[in-house]
Image: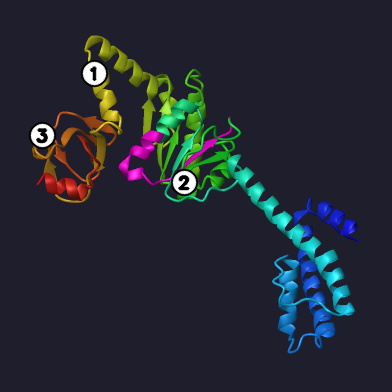
Amino acid sequence: MLFWVTRSFRNFRKRRGASLALILLLVLAALLGNSACFYFFEAQAHEGLTWLDAVWYSIVSISTIGYGDYFPQTTGGRLGAFFFIILVGLSAFSGMLGLLVDWMVEMSQRELMGLSTVPCRNHVILVNFPGQARVRQILEELRLDEGRLRRDVVIVSERIERLPFALDNVFFVHGSPLQEETFRRARLDQASVALVLCTDPADLTSDGVVASVVTMIEHLRPDIKTVAECLDERHRVLFESTSCDSIVYSNRVVNHLLVQETCQSGVACLVEKLTDQADGDSLFCTAVEQGPERDALTFACALLAQDLNVMGVTRDGVTHTRLKSLRLREGDEVLYVGARRYAWEEMAALGA
């Protein structure tokens, strides 16, 4: 009997829905059957025995706790305990624990392999995995950003089976970034920004993939901020039909930096310092909110006295570094060097 029950559980565990229903039914039958036997046969042996006492005895026996406050003393009670507790109850209870362990292991494996839906809100989605070293550097920079210090990051890629590292607040979703189901598991509807990297820094054709991913993201979530990496500036036309908020031409930026450093030593060190949030002052951006227009040059001079160095103002996608005759208005973005990011209310008060 015990062998048959054990073998049945082993077979049914392969069909989790049916096995769970069977196990719950057997546990319930064992509880009720043993409680009835114990109450019927042991009422005289245990003075004041109630039905709840019989149920309590069945529960602590099936769960293998066994406090010892009740135990069968009659032949009928012992036979009932042998059948309902030992043969049926313990086997069913063990099967239930086995299913629970299987479920926990499966959930853990699905999460590691990026097959489950991430539990994130207001997070950053990082699309593609062009290399472990580069992705880790980007993650570290995001974690150093004061505004995103506690935000989760979800990495979406189909080129890796699981993340080669483990970091707090970093999740993984495995799947094609050109499929809606992948972004459903990445909770695109709850994300705040999507950063789309190239698939391979040595493959210029990856710009086409990046443009397609941006199109997919904007189709699913038109209001999300998107930042895309483009390797070859000649592929700018691929992004003309998209509404990508920012496009970074990484190869062009690197080439400009190399030429500048060749002609004027120290430029590379300055750029590295301004873009490295782990090394003191860094480059930040604050959007101008509703309010009266301000003279940009006067505003910049006032901020300089507060150790905030205004580098330029971005308006309609164009960055102006010459502030004379420029007036700040709602929608502009002030680029500045400082120890931290300031909200517009703080910045406006400092520049008053």
Q: In the image, is residue 68 above or below residue 50?
A: above
Task: Determine if residue 245 is in view.
Answer: no
The residue wearing badge 3 is: 325
Q: Quadrant of the N terminus?
A: bottom right
Kind of residue sitting beneath label 2: Arg
Q: Residue at coordinates 11% horizontally, 40% vertically from top-left? A: 306
Estimate the x, y position of residue 169 in percent, counting from the top left.
46, 44
Q: Secondary structure at mark 1?
A: helix
Q: Residues within 10 Å of mark 2 (few under 14, many from 20)?
A: some
Q: Residue at coordinates 42% horizontally, 28% vertically from top-left? A: 229
Q: Verify CB contact (< 8 Å) between mark 3 and mark 1.
A: no
Q: Residue at coordinates 51% horizontally, 21% vertically from top-left? A: 205
The residue wearing badge 1 is: 267
Estimate the x, y position of residue 136 in percent, counting from the top left.
44, 31
Q: Residues within 10 Å of mark 3 (few under 14, many from 20)?
A: few
- Label 3 and label 1: CA atoms lie apart by 28 Å
Kind of residue sitting beneath label 1: Val
Q: Is residue 147 magenta?
A: yes
Number of the front mark, 2 or 1: 1
Q: Quadrant of residue 180?
A: top right
Earlier in the chain: of badge 2 and badge 1, it is 2
| Count of all numbered marks drawn on residues in the image | 3
Range drawn in magenta: 140-159
The residue wearing badge 2 is: 221
Estimate the x, y position of residue 41 in percent, counting from the top left.
85, 83
